[in-house]
Image: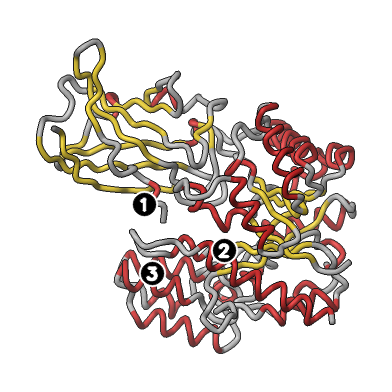
Amino acid sequence: MFDNNVFIEGTCKNVEEDGKIIGYEMQTHITYYRGIPLSMVNFLAVEVDGVKEDPANIRFAVDPYDWFTLDEMTTVSTIKWEYGTPGTVRVLKEGGLSKGEHEVHLTVCTRTAYIPVPLEGNMTRKVVIE
Amino acid sequence: MGIKSSVSLYSLQYQFLQGKMNLEDIIKFVMNLGADGIELLPDQMLHGTPTPSEETYACWDSLMAKYHPGLACDDIFLNTNLYINRTLTKRECADLIKQEIVMAHRLGFDCIRLVSFVPAWILEPCLETAEKNNVSLNIEIHGGLGFGCPKTDEYINEMLRLNSPYVGIVPDTSLFVRKQPRIVRDYCTKLMGLNPDIAKYADDVFASGTDFFELRNKNGGEMDPKLASLIRSGADAFYAQNLEGYENRPLSIMDGLEKYINHFHFKLYEMTEEGVEYSIDYREVLEYLHKAGYQKYVSTEYEGNRWQLPDTPIPEVEQVTAHQKLVQRLIKEVEG
């Protein structure tokens, strides 16, 4: 139901820091119709060309200031992922994505108190790294 | 004085998400439709709720001063599962609702809608704050969670016990669905490969004057056996579960509770080319409300936006426009 909120087209790119590519990232909207604190994000998952990334390498931020691991997010109740504000999912991986075309799949899963099942959204996009 | 029309800004959520309309565009659009007011989901279109910044409040105040919308309802939810490893305590829950009440008052609302499943025990500890801020607390009564659902009945019993003008209900017209929403059936058929026999059976059940919520209740809380027997795939299961969220009840189920109705949700699944809502007979609903002496808001809540095929435009603007045209005309006609 929220698949179309996931993985904003054209946002996947390698991330360079101090002259080194430290990984890659992409932007996504929330899989819910309200903003919620980060502690209510159940999980984020990334798969590239059919291979699942290690969740320990995933970081998430909703602003330019604070990056969290998935474990850390479970206690973040004062920073909200606002509806309409893209969050950034980053995967730490030396060298990032290799040049060429990739199939990148993102899963975003949130929970609410009144819908009995977690709200999972999925999107696969073809990404070209130049 | 009479029945007033409003639009829940939920109806335009994809315009907001996709950056096609901001909050100002949306308020301006709704007021230009001739609606009397708006319903807001603060945690959808304002940042930092329930304690937004002074800057956010100033921005809100300037929009109110510019467009003067009536403030029909503040639509909130209680995140009892804020943490994955525990449920919030009653004190934590009451504190969150109190913050919402204070914010609602500051924004200018005097009516809060609590989404279904907000527990009834929240009412008493929050009542003093509600009174002090002149904001009523009202539970949503939605199809599939309607009268007869234990959580809803528990709330209604508590409401009757407290008997306060600050505790009431917001019925939703998903209780009065006469035909299953065609748009949902089409979505599940085209995108998911729904078994057509289920869709046909659903049409028959609604045409016979009942619904799958009632059939489940009659079957000891288990899914109607015939519906269950037609499920052959995940798509069928999804559709079947969704069907139980539409009730086909008579309006008279609200008899005796009229004085507790502080707001009303006018669900919109699909406006047809004939200018009527496909599933709900709004003349029937408005005639009932007029006869009951109802003089508060009725809010368009467009839910067809979530049943659009991927990569197709979401016709929120068009659908809300057509629904408001219908509702505003019918209010005039029934009130004479």
With respect to residue B129, does B118 lie above or below? Answer: below
Residue A3 marker: 1
Kindly indicate whether the residues beneath marks 1 and 3 are on one polypeptide chain.
no
Front one among A32 and A11: A11
Mark identifier at residue B187 = 3
Q: Nearer the viewer, residue B110 or B14?
A: B14
Classify the position of the C terminus of chain B by image quarter: bottom right
Q: Amino acid at mark 1?
A: Asp
Q: Nearer the viewer, mark 2 or mark 1?
A: 2
Query: In the image, what residue type sits under mark 3?
Result: Tyr
As drawn, B258 above or below A50: below
What is the CA distance from the residue labelled 2 to the residue labelled 3? 16 Å
Residue B170 visible to the viewer: yes
Q: Nearer the viewer, residue B19 or B236?
A: B19
In the image, residue B163 lies at what x, y percent? 89, 55
Label 2–label 3 contact, CB within 8 A? no
Q: Secondary structure at mark 2?
A: strand
Q: Position of residue B122 (x, y in %)?
A: 75, 43
